[in-house]
Amino acid sequence: MSLTRDDVRRIALLARIEVSDAEVERTRDQLNGILGFVEQLQAVDTTGVAPMSHAVDVVQRLREDRVTETDRHADFQRIAPETEAGLYLVPKVIE
């Protein structure tokens, strides 16, 4: 696939970038190079290759799931303006 000068102008318009007439030819060559590389990648036979989420086999170290903070609920209830049955009471906001 080879892009024309009009294709480059259309792509620039859609991307909302300004490409001057002097830059169109250089941009066309660069885009054609990228598309050529994509065609090379698509030509590679990947039959039997398992999909992977990362190029390197990454294993995440997990820590033990345990509580690390003390329960301070009673302390916070004690300093709250109003509480009832373990809940915080707040002023009514919606009539």
Image (cartoon, helix red, strand yellow):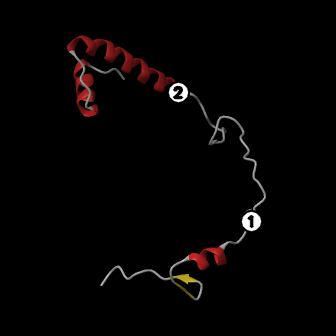
Question: As rendered, which of 50 and 26 lies closer to the eye?
Answer: 26
Residue 5 x/y as whole percent? 24, 18
**Residue that numbered label 1 is attached to:** 67
Quadrant in the picture for residue 13: top left
The one of 42 and 31 positioned closer to us in this rendering: 31
Name the residue: 32% across, 17% down.
27
Q: Amino acid at mark 1?
A: Val
Q: How many marks?
A: 2
Q: Is residue 9 above or below residue 49?
A: above
Q: Residues within 10 Å of mark 2 (few under 14, many from 20)?
A: few
Say what secondary structure mark 1 lies in: loop
Element marked by disc 2:
helix
Q: Which sits earlier in the primary sequence, circle 1 or circle 2?
A: 2
Picture residue at 66% right of the left edge, 78% below the top: 74
Tell me the number on the disc at residue 41. 2
Crowding at label 1, few (<14), some or many (≥20) Cα neighbours within 10 Å?
A: few
Location of residue 16 in the rendering, given as x and y in whole percent from the top left corner: 25, 31
Q: Which amino acid is tagged 2?
A: Leu
In-image side of 34 versus 86 (left or right): left
The residue that appears at 66% across and 41% down in the rendered structure is 50
Question: Residue at 40% of width from left, 81% of height from top?
Answer: 91
Mark 1–mark 2 Cα distance, whole angstroms, equals 49 Å
x, y percentage for residue 65? Answer: 75, 62
